[in-house]
Image: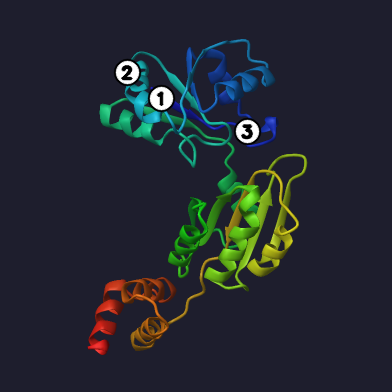
């Protein structure tokens, strides 16, 4: 079978007994970075030296079929550099191929930055959505965040430290400067820190520079009832300001929860 194994996200003491046992007995490991896997084996005092196979974003499509066949005859342990494979890390393509081929897939649960940052954020945890990394290009990032403007669930994002300040500023524009959020960095490590406040406050805080692995958690949108006629009015106002009707309808839809098609058709009827 294929075994997805969660690895420490910072503190080596979070390695589970099951992970160590699997590393001590497995014959083959598919790793995001084989050098990182070698360091993990050494740090955990594992004497076993399994076959290490690189499995990363650039080769997963090509290697998936081969690895699925390997897993038919013996267990294949899958590791990412930190946390659970497939969660913003390689592994999804391999799992999908294994499921399609009828090869069993299981997991050794363990550390993950998503629930860890969510738990310490101080924001609602009953319902949340994981959004991964936002787009790098500023225009695409702003569009993606605007589309989440009316998302009612707490949102969890990964971000590179060099882009945190810009992303928080864009979040403040898309979600509102007063939306509550948290920024956790270096989770489980020596210099772990979680900053909490409004998006405007956190954007200002991040301007000084942020180091380490970063997880941003943002409160969901408050429940706001906007009548469809008022929403159509917002669409027409954006069009009068030079926006395209289709884009305006999509933007107001994200903010109000009304259907993009409904707003488009209603605004088009008014324009006629």
Q: Is residue 46 above or below residue 209?
A: above
| Residue 113: quarter of image | top right
Marker disc for residue 67: none
Q: Is residue 147 above or below residue 38?
A: below
Count of labels in the image: 3
The mark that comes first in sequence, 3 or 2, is 3
Marker disc for residue 69: 2
Tell me, yes or no, whether the two marked residues, 1 and 2, touch with CB atoms within 8 Å.
Answer: no
For the N terminus, give its image quadrant: top left
- Residue 5 x %, y %: 51, 29
Q: Nearer the viewer, mark 1 or mark 2?
A: 2
* Mark 1 residue crowding within 10 angstroms, few (<14) / some (14–19) / many (20+): many
Reading the image, the residue beneath label 3 is: 8
Q: Left or right: where does residue 95 sit relative to residue 50? A: left
For the C terminus, give its image quadrant: bottom left
Q: CA distance from mark 1 to mark 2?
A: 10 Å
Q: Is residue 134 above or below residue 181?
A: above
Mark 3: secondary structure: loop
The mark that comes first in sequence, 3 or 1, is 1
* Mark 3 residue crowding within 10 angstroms, few (<14) / some (14–19) / many (20+): many
Mark 1: secondary structure: strand
Give me the residue at 72% from left, 39% from top: 189
Reading the image, the residue beneath label 1 is: 2
Q: Left or right: where does residue 225 sit relative to residue 200? A: left
Give me the residue at 53% from left, 20% from top: 22
- Residue 138 x %, y %: 52, 59
Give me the residue at 47% from left, 69% from top: 149
């Amino acid at each position: 079978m294929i075994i997805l194994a969660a690895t420490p996200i910072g503190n080596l003491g979070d390695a589970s007994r099951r992970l160590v046992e699997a590393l001590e007995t497995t014959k083959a490991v598919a790793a995001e970075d084989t050098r990182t896997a070698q360091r993990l084996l050494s740090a955990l005092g594992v004497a076993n030296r399994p076959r290490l196979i690189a499995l990363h974003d650039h080769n997963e499509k090509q290697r998936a079929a081969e690895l699925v066949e390997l897993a038919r005859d013996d267990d294949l342990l899958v590791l990412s550099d930190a946390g659970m494979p497939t969660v913003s890390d390689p592994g999804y393509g391999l799992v999908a191929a294994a499921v399609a081929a009828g090869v069993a897939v299981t997991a050794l649960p363990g550390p993950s930055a998503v629930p860890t940052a969510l738990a310490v954020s101080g924001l609602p945890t009953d319902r949340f959505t994981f959004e991964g990394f936002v787009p790098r290009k500023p225009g695409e990032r702003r569009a993606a965040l605007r589309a989440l403007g009316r998302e009612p669930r707490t949102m969890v994002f990964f971000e590179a430290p060099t882009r945190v300040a810009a992303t928080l500023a864009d979040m403040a524009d898309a979600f509102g400067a007063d939306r509550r959020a948290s920024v956790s960095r270096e989770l489980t490590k020596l210099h772990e820190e979680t900053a909490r406040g409004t998006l405007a406050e956190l954007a200002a805080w991040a301007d000084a520079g942020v180091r380490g692995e970063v997880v941003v958690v943002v409160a969901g949108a408050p429940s706001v009832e906007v009548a469809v006629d008022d929403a159509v009015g917002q669409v027409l106002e954006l069009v009068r300001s030079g926006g395209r009707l289709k884009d305006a309808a999509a933007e107001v839809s994200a903010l109000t929860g009304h259907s993009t098609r409904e707003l488009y058709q209603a605004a088009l009827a008014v324009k006629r």
